[in-house]
Image (spheres, rainbow, N blue to C red):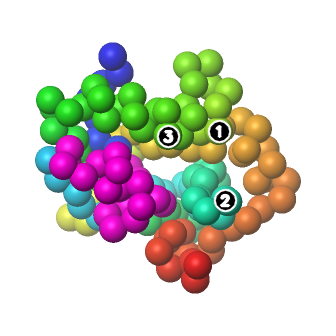
Amino acid sequence: MPSALPFFVYGTLLTGERNHAVFLAGRCASVRPAVLDGAALHAGPGFPYAVPDPAPGRRIVGELVTIRPAAYPEALAALDRLEDCRPHGDGEYVRERLTVRTEDGGTAAAWVYLAGPAVGARLRAHPALIASGDWRRQGR
């Protein structure tokens, strides 16, 4: 099993959003604000995609979710299914270990679901950028 890292969430898995209640509620040990630098947020069909982006100031606003140890294996499997994260990396999303900034100024390693190869290529060719980097502030 992969390392039991917290998850950086930035869309429908955020507290109060539709998938948080289904996949994370009752499984969380902690949820705290965090930021992923070096990535851009793009609008998808009812949910966002994170795409690595080295442009200055690119960042995604989200939450660092720590899952209770007893609930971790089930939560990881459920999130991988939700995100169509496949072992060979050809799904809608890929799960990568990245470093995020926490609200206290520290950093933490976290699992982040990034747009998979085909989706990422499409978004780089035809961006759907959410300039604020904040799913909740995109005006949907």
According to the picture, the residue beneath numbered tag 3 turns out to be: 82
Residue identifier under label 2: 44
Disc 3 is placed on an element classified as helix
Q: Residue, x 20% and y 33% (percent of image)?
A: 71
Whichever of labels 3 and 2 marks the residue nearer the N terminus, that label is: 2
Distance between the Cα atoms at labels 1 and 2? 11 Å
Q: Which residue is mark 1?
A: 92
Three-letter amino acid code at the position of disc 2: Gly
Q: Position of residue 91 (x, y in %)?
A: 64, 31
Closer to us: mark 1 or mark 3? 3
- Magenta highlight on residue 22: yes
Q: Residue at x 62, y 25 (%)?
A: 89
Q: Is residue 94 above or below residue 127?
A: above
Amino acid carrying label 3: it is Leu
- Decide which of tag 1 and tag 3 comes sooner along the chain: 3
Q: Position of residue 4 (x, y in %)?
A: 26, 29
Which quarter shows the N terminus? top left
Q: Is residue 105 visible?
A: no
Asked which quadrant contains residue 63, the reply is bottom left
Give x and y (percent) for residue 36. 45, 56
What is the CA distance from the residue labelled 1 to the residue labelled 3? 10 Å
Mark 3 to mark 2 CA distance (whole Å): 15 Å
- Counting residues from the start of the chain, the first of labels 1 and 2 encountered is 2
- Can residue 120 be seen from the camera position used here? yes
What range is drawn magenta here?
Answer: 8-28
Residue at image position (83%, 59%) is 126
